[in-house]
Amino acid sequence: MSIWARIGELASRISAGAVSGIAEIIESVRTTFAGDPELRRKVAFSIAMIALSAKMAKADGIVTQEEVRAFQEIFSMPPEQERNVTRLYRLAMSDTAGYEAYAERLANLCGSGQRDCQMLEDILDGLFHIAKADGLIHEKEVEFLRRIADIFNISDSHFRAILARHAVLEDSDPYAILGIERGTSFEKVKRRYRELVAEHHPDKLVSRGVPEEFVAIANDRIAAINTAYETIERGRVPA
């Protein structure tokens, strides 16, 4: 059974009154799929993106058509499941529980206290993809994302690297995107670039439980890493 069918089952529990909030759904995922860790991660990741996207849409007080389209780019879902995803999205928007409650439950996806968990970085990248869809990342959205990163135990330096590769600016710092200091030798730059490409290849996302439907996240990430490396290689930014 596909992840969307599973999400449909969870959405039906809302209609039946079995659950009243996204936080309860996230908790039910942990118990319902306890015997299938891979499926649990995929369903939890999908619900995380739906719920946190909805909460972030309220961060700057505006939901634009560009953000809706960016959401749809990430969520390549069967037409028959669109109603269920919409139901979860609207529930998250109206839920009185704050986004911190969702993030705290999701932080357990990689185990308690794990630093810079790649699965959680995938979620953060998806949220950045939506936030920048209207051509800029609003200050309140950055605050929202920084708080999510803090709950996810993503280090400040790691968050700055993620922010740099999503910055909607022509002069975005390529050294920050690669997570290295300006002035680093080109051999070390090349080594770091190769590490990042291997680490963030789309196949790696799938292997750690990110649904295949979310390859747009990996493609965005790799494109930013490639551009940063090429900029340094061409010498456009002085070391």
Image (spheres, helix red, strand yellow):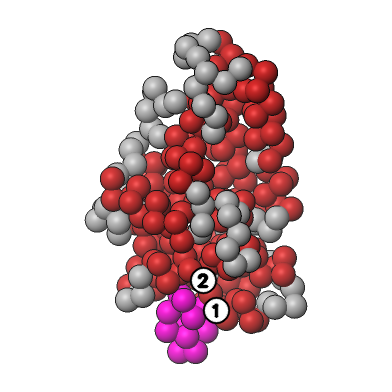
Give the side of residue 141 with respect to residue 70, left or right.
left
Residue hosting label 2: 105
Other residues around mark 2 within 10 Å, as few (<14) / some (14–19) / many (≥20): some
Tell me residue 24's x, y (percent): 49, 81
Mark 1 or 2: in front is: 2
Q: Which mark is drawn over residue 79?
A: none
Q: Which of pointers 1 and 2 lies earlier in the amino acid sequence?
A: 1
Q: Which residues are magenta?
A: 13-25
Amino acid type at circle 1 is: Glu
Can the viewer see residue 102? yes
Q: Residue at image x 39%, y 66%?
A: 99
Pointer 1 with pointer 2, Cβ within 8 A: yes
Give the side of residue 165 with respect to residue 59, left or right.
right
Residue hosting label 1: 27
Image quadrant in which the N terminus is located: bottom right
Q: Residue at image x 50%, y 49%?
A: 155
- Is residue 23 a member of the stretch shown in magenta? yes
- Is residue 179 a member of the stretch shown in magenta? no
Give the secondary structure at mark 2: helix
